[in-house]
Amino acid sequence: MAVTWRSVLASGREQLGPARTHEAKWLVERASGLDGTDLLMHLDDCVASRHLAYFDQMLARRKSGEPLQYVLGRWAFRGLDLLVDPRVLIPRPETEVVAGLAIAALCDWPNDARRALDLGTGSGAIGLSLAAEVPGAQVWMTDRSSEALAVARANLAGLGGRAATRVALLESDWFSAVPADLVQSFSVIVSNPPYVHDTASLPEEVVGWEPASALFAGPDGTDALRHLIATAPGWLVAGGTLVLELSPEQGPSMAALALGAGYHDVRIESDLTGRSRALVARRPA
Ligand SMILES: C[S@@+](CC[C@H](N)C(=O)[O-])C[C@H]1O[C@@H](n2cnc3c(N)ncnc32)[C@H](O)[C@@H]1O
């Protein structure tokens, strides 16, 4: 009997089980190169053996516990379709909110002052969103991991167009390799740094696959946050904004730290589920 996309989909659903039945459609879409109504129109087409082999390989990887996003090799973030693999953290929905806060802050500046820095860029999710969504934005994106930067570079190539010409990538331990002539010149500094405490027990799908250097940051998870709050004022222009992703329980102490460090307009913002997820603070004008 001929193998059709309908039968492949049914087999995928059965093998992945009830909790992941919806994922079979993602895998079929990836293997077939068809999505939405296109897939519906071709469900009864015969499946070429190379497409079936690709589907089977992805299904086996998913059944072994590899995150769906790495199996697919791509993931959506705001308007972007990003390459993702185990060299980078999988971009999360709460980070879309953090990127939105940075975008709003950058838009408050005139076009020629829209200079932003995304620290620990990983896949490039935040920095590339700034470049794509803020007219005239000049964006520097840094990461300590050369492997992560290779992924960010590929995603920058995917961005293309004029926005891509206004993006620079730097291998850097936070600010260390940012050119000295950019001191006190950024109108927005944004980061989703590692903020999980070292002894946290995370799901196997996270800790077994995503880079540890993207997750863990000291005994209470605030090592990177504290460093960025302390050092960002030296790189922000007067009135510039720092936006940091954090976990909900870190909000009050990091807000207090920012106030103590002299920031103004310090606030904690929530994600779409109402959980505190970002510190926003301004360097005094
Ligand atoms: C939580 S991930 C965020 C990735 C991406 N910005 C996102 O939101 O999906 C943290 C990133 O910070 C990078 N990182 C960790 N320590 C760093 C350091 N000292 N300097 C620069 N980047 C660092 C990691 O390599 C990782 O890519």
Image (spheres, rainbow, N blue to C red):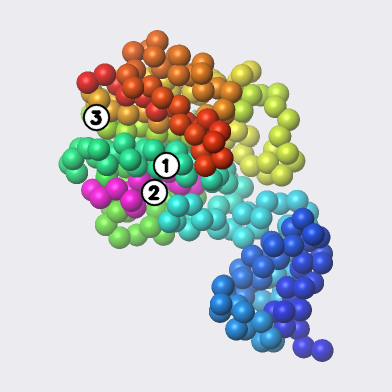
Asked if the magenta segment contains residue 128, the reply would be yes
x and y, in percent, of residue 24 in the image: 71, 66
The answer to which of 169 and 39 lies nearer the viewer is 39
Magenta residues, as a range? 123-136
Asked if the magenta segment contains residue 177, the reply would be no
How crowded pointer 2 is (Cα within 10 Å; few <14, some 14-19, many 20+) is rated as many
Q: Is disc 3 placed on a helix, strand or loop?
A: loop
Give the label, 2 or 3, closer to the camera.
2
For the C terminus, which image quadrant?
A: top left
Label ID, residue 129: 2
CA distance for labels 1 and 3:
20 Å
Compared to 12, does 248 lie above or below? above
Contact between marks 1 and 2 (CB within 8 A): the answer is yes
How crowded pointer 1 is (Cα within 10 Å; few <14, some 14-19, many 20+) is rated as many
Compared to 166, does 62 lie above or below? below
Q: Which residue is under mark 3?
A: 185
User: Is the CB–ligand 1 distance for label 3 below 8 Å?
Assistant: no
